[in-house]
Amino acid sequence: MNNQNMLKYFISLMLLFSFLTGSSQEREKDTLKYKDRYGLRFGADVFTPIYSIFNSDRKGFEIVADYRISKRFWAAAEGGYTYNYSEEDFFKFTSSGSFIKAGADFNAYKNWIGMENMIVVGLRYGFSVFDQTLNEYTINTDPFLPSVTKTTPVTHNGLTAQWIEANIGLKVEVMHNLFLGMIFSGKHMLTVNDPENFKSLFVPGFNRVYINDFGFGFSYTVSYLIPFYRK
């Protein structure tokens, strides 16, 4: 074999080696690509059941769920039931009923590969159907006369309320597919059917209604992810 043929042979080997190396690198890059999991995550708020152990005036439950619709957005919903007994300066009342909330969450945290933790920024629309009972109230129409306390309960059924709320919090995967979440919410009442001569100061799903129809909430959730596919 002369020098010219040897050179051609060497060049051919180098080209083949370069091609095989390039193909191997491409396959390696493909294996390093991580596909996010898409599926349904459902669970419950454990804050209210734990709180009711120490305070019997508040009872209820809340079911939570979300579904991933894109890389950083989730469709989300919550629903449940709340019973609450309250005492104010001149009256005592009970509120009880069911509620549902629906909206979306955005993950403001960029995970490392393989992580699925969230800094949650969310928005909800809430709707509640509830009953309100005025258990006891005091009337004082004349400052020169003693006040009168009424103890006959007055119940108003089928009241409704609508509100919007903004959420911020965390969801952390503590075990495979198991998530713990802490969510704080600020709320603003849109509409509410108040009983005659009495303002609804507590609405299930909204909680305490403060001045200017604002409110706040907190939930501590445990949820489980059922992955459907990867993308």
Image (cartoon, helix red, strand yellow):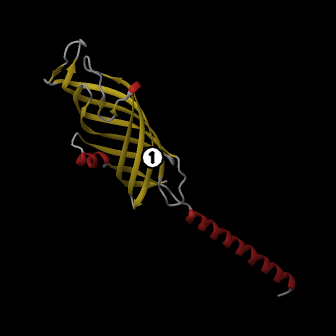
Quadrant of res 10: bottom right
Q: Residue furthest bottom?
A: 1
In the rendered image of this protein, does residue 59 appear above or below residue 138? below
In the rendered image of this protein, does residue 110 appear above or below residue 215? below
Residue 18 percent coordinates (x, y): 72, 72
Q: Which residue is mark 1?
A: 169
Residue 224 percent coordinates (x, y): 35, 54
Quadrant of res 215: top left
At 33% from the left and 33% from the top, the residue drawn is: 208
At 63% from the left and 65% from the top, the residue drawn is: 26
Task: Return the residue nearer the eye: 42 or 210.
Answer: 210
In the rendered image of this protein, does residue 86 appear above or below residue 46? above
Mark 1 residue element: strand
Quadrant of res 30: bottom right
At 20% from the left and 23% from the top, the residue drawn is: 137
Residue 135 percent coordinates (x, y): 18, 27
Q: Amino acid at mark 1?
A: Gly
